[in-house]
Amino acid sequence: MPQPHPLLVVADEVRDALATAAPVVALESTIISHGMPYPDNVAMAREVEAIIRAAGAVPATIAVLDGRPRVGLETADLELLGSSPDVTKVSRRDLGHVIARGGHGATTVAATMRLAALAGISVFVTGGLGGVHRGAAETFDVSADLTELGQTRVAVVCAGVKSILDIGLTLESLETLGVPVIGYRTVEFPAFFSRSSGFPAPLRSQTPEEIAATMRAHWELGIQGGLVIANPIPVAAEIPAAQIGAIIAAALGDMAASGIRGSDATPYLLARIVELTGGESLQANIALVKDNAVLGAQIAAAYAAAAALTGV
C-alpha cells in the first residue's frame, strides 16, 4: 500500500485504515463551509461520517487548516469550517497559495480529489459535481472538477452535476476527457435535486461490486483519470425537474442582476435556491449526500475486498 504524501496530515484512524487496506471514503469540505448554512452544515458533516462508519468504511473529510492539508478531521475542525468566515473556497489552483500563507481552506471536488489521491484514497463522496456553466460559450466558466476528473485516479460518487449547470455540455466534456460516467441503477443521468435530467446515463451498473470491478479494470489499463458514479437523489427527497427548473432560472436572473460570477457563483446560487424553495432544496441536498455516503462506503468496501483477494 503506497504511503500518504509527506505534506499531508492524516488522522490516525485514516492512516491505520489505509495501512491495512481497509475501505476509506474521502469527503469534501466546501459543502460544509460554502454549501449549507450553519449549523445544518456541521450536523450534516457529522451525520455523513457516521453513515460511512455504520456502512463499514472510514470517513476522511479533507480540508486545509493552518496551511496543512488534512485528511480526516475532528469535531472542532468541522465546527471551524462550518462557522468561521475566514475559510477560503479552495480548488486545485488555490491549494499551493493557501498552504503557503498558512490559511484555512475548504476543498472543492477538484482539490479533494487531488489530496485524496495523494493519501491513497480511491473513493470520494460528494453532493454534486461542478461542470460547464450555462452561458459558458461567452464566459468560459468551466469547473476545474472536470479537469481533475480527467487526470486523477479517484471514483467520485455524486447525484449527478449541479442542476444550475449545463448538463449536456458537462457530459460532452467528460466524454472528451475519457471519464466513465456510470449511472447507478438508473438509465437516466440524474440532475442533483431531480432524478431526471433528460440525458441518458452513458454507462450503467446495478451493484457496488460491479462499479468496483470497473474501477480496477479502468486503472489497470493504465488510464489516468477518475470515474463518475451518478446516484439519483432518493425519490422521497426529489424536487421535480419542472419545479426546480423555474426556481433555478429565477436564481440565475438574480445572480446576473447582482453581477456575481466566478467562484462565487455556485455558493450564491445554492443559497438563493434555498431561499426560493423555503428550505426544501437544503433538505434535498442533505438527503442526497447521505444516500451517496451509503453507496460510497459500499463501493469502497467492494474495492478493498477485491484488492485483498488479488493482493493488488
Image: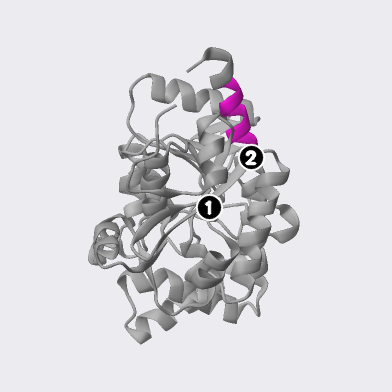
Q: What label does residue 57 carry, if any?
A: 2
Taking depth in this image into account, of 1 and 207 the one nearest to the observer is 1
- Furthest toward the right, the residue is 236
What kind of colouring is applied to the model shown? Answer: one colour
Q: Which residues are magenta?
A: 298-306
Q: Residue furthest front?
A: 12
Q: Secondary structure at mark 2?
A: loop
As drawn, the label of residue 215 is none
* Rendering coords of residue 21 (x, y %): 54, 29
Q: How far across and how far down the image is residue 276, in percent? A: 59, 80
Which residue lies at the image location 65% right of the left edge and 30% below the top edge? Answer: 207
Question: Dots 2 and 1: beta carbons under 8 Å?
Answer: no
Rendered image quadrant of residue 298: top right
Q: Is residue 243 visible?
A: no
Amino acid type of the residue that numbered disc 1 sits on in the rendered structure: Thr
Q: Please report the residue visible at 51 percent of the width from the left and 79 percent of the height from the top.
A: 272
Q: Which residue in the protein does label 1 denote?
A: 126
Does residue 286 show up?
yes
Q: In the figure, is residue 207 to the left or right of 7?
A: right
Nearer to the camera, 200 or 206: 206
